[in-house]
Amino acid sequence: MTETKSERRPRRDADGRLSTVGDLLGVAFAGLVTGIVVLLIFEGIMALAQAFDFGSSSGWLALILPVWLFTEEFRAAGYGAYRIVVAALAAGFGVAVGMTLAGLAAATFPPLVSGAAGAFGLTVVYCLVWFYGLRWLSHRVG
């Protein structure tokens, strides 16, 4: 038998942050998909119990695991005002894009789908702004 050397995924740096944007997006998307699947199961059970119609709960609930990831990334970034600035910018741009996507989808789709579209947009924008903004600004301040 031959042994293959496997590298731990997702990769983290010495501070505990995810080391590549691909790792950050992958973990965030895994959490988002997990949240959507759990929400769909919950919706299915509640629709079968005739508690409410399928698709009537908010798809924004799928953000629970990505927000947890973002909180851990914020904590691992260490101390400094730059992480607060980058987190505020990432959250602002992410919410703006997410609300725009959710608003566009709300005209056609139920709240479950429109909220999930908004959660997807927020996750992508937050990851990109956080990863590149944090590295750029941390190098600028020293």
Image (tube, rainbow, N blue to C red):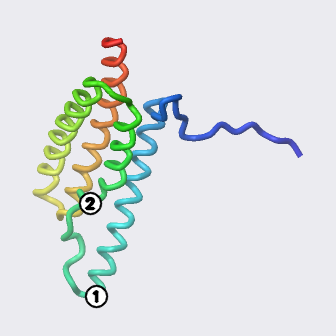
Circle 1 — which element?
Answer: loop
Residue at x 30% of width, y 53% of height = 63
Q: Is residue 12 left or right of residue 87?
A: right
Q: Crowding near pointer 2: few (<14 within 10 Å), some, many (20+)?
A: some
Q: Position of residue 133 (x, y in %)?
A: 30, 24
Name the residue furthest front. Answer: 79
Count of numbered tags: 2
For the C terminus, which image quadrant?
Answer: top left
Question: Identity of the amino acid at label 2?
Answer: Leu
Of 54 and 95, nearer the camera is 95
Residue 101: give x, y in percent of width and height: 18, 46
Residue 108 appears left or right of 40: left
Q: Quadrant of residue 50?
A: bottom left
Left or right of residue 106: residue 10: right
Nearer-the-camera pick, 42 or 113: 42
Q: Callout 1, which amino acid?
A: Ala
Task: Kindly identify the residue that appears in the image at 30 percent across and 25 percent down.
Answer: 80
Mark 1 against mark 2, which lies toward the viewer?
2
**CB contact under 8 Å: marks 1 and 2:** no
Q: Label 1, label 2: how many angstroms apart (C-alpha)? A: 21 Å
Could you say which disc has been placed on residue 49 in the image?
Answer: 1
Secondary element at image label 2: helix
| Residue marked by disc 2 | 61
Q: In the image, residue 29 lies at what x, y percent?
A: 40, 47
Q: Nearer the viewer, residue 109 or 14?
A: 14
Relative to 37, is 53 above or below?
Answer: below
Relative to residue 14, is residue 116 drawn left or right? left
